[in-house]
Amino acid sequence: MRKGAGTAVFLIGALAPFLFPAGRLTAPAGSPAAEKTPVRLLRTLEEARPGPGWPFVLVFFSTSCPVCWDDLFEMRNIIESNDLPVKLIGVSVDRTEDLEAFLKKYAFTHPVVADRRREVHRRFRIQAAPYKLLLRDETVLYRDDVLQDPKTQRERLKRCLLEMTSKSLFF
């Protein structure tokens, strides 16, 4: 990949929900892409968590919140484009049917916890979406600061993820 190409892909991917109408981001119903998209909808965080010692990002989102989508898609792009050994897990209180449709529509293959009873929300004291946490086991390494603007929050989390990787804190 040529220098700077990752940045362009990252920016386009992060802004895709706002740049393109939602219908253009979807695979046509019945198409091979739509049929092959696995929906990873889980009931508990324990089902989604990586093995001991591995970091993971929780992105609390709602299917009715485009700002939440931006956080979810941007975290996916940061992790995938930088090949970070970090697991991305979405968490939502939305109805199962809405989550399944959303995951399929946007070909989102990372696990999502359907937190209808708000158990994960209560466990980490999350009041509203969007919200992001970076954890290793039960230790919170990053938590969004609600007093900061979303852009600053994303940059702080990205910096934290990249610093962790550069310091080889995973092994």
Image (cartoon, rainbow, N blue to C red):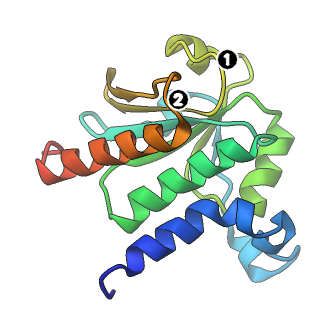
Q: Disc 1 marks which amino acid?
A: Arg
- x, y percentage for residue 149? 53, 34
**In this view, 12 is above or below 63:** below
Q: Residue at x 68, y 44 (%)?
A: 67
In space, the residues marked 2 and 1 are separated at their CA atoms by 11 Å
Q: Which residue is mark 2?
A: 45
Location of the C terminus (image quadrant): top left
Q: Disc 2 marks which amino acid?
A: Leu
Q: Residue at x 68, y 26 (%)?
A: 115
For the residue pair 45 and 89, the one nearer the viewer reads as 89
Dot 1 falls on a residue whose secondary structure is loop
Q: Which mark is residue 118?
A: 1
**Of marks 2 and 1, the one in the foreground:** 1
- x, y percentage for residue 134? 38, 34
- x, y percentage for residue 83? 33, 64
**In this view, 127 is above or below 80:** above
**Mark 2 Cα shell of 10 Å, populated few (<14), some (14-19), many (≥20):** some
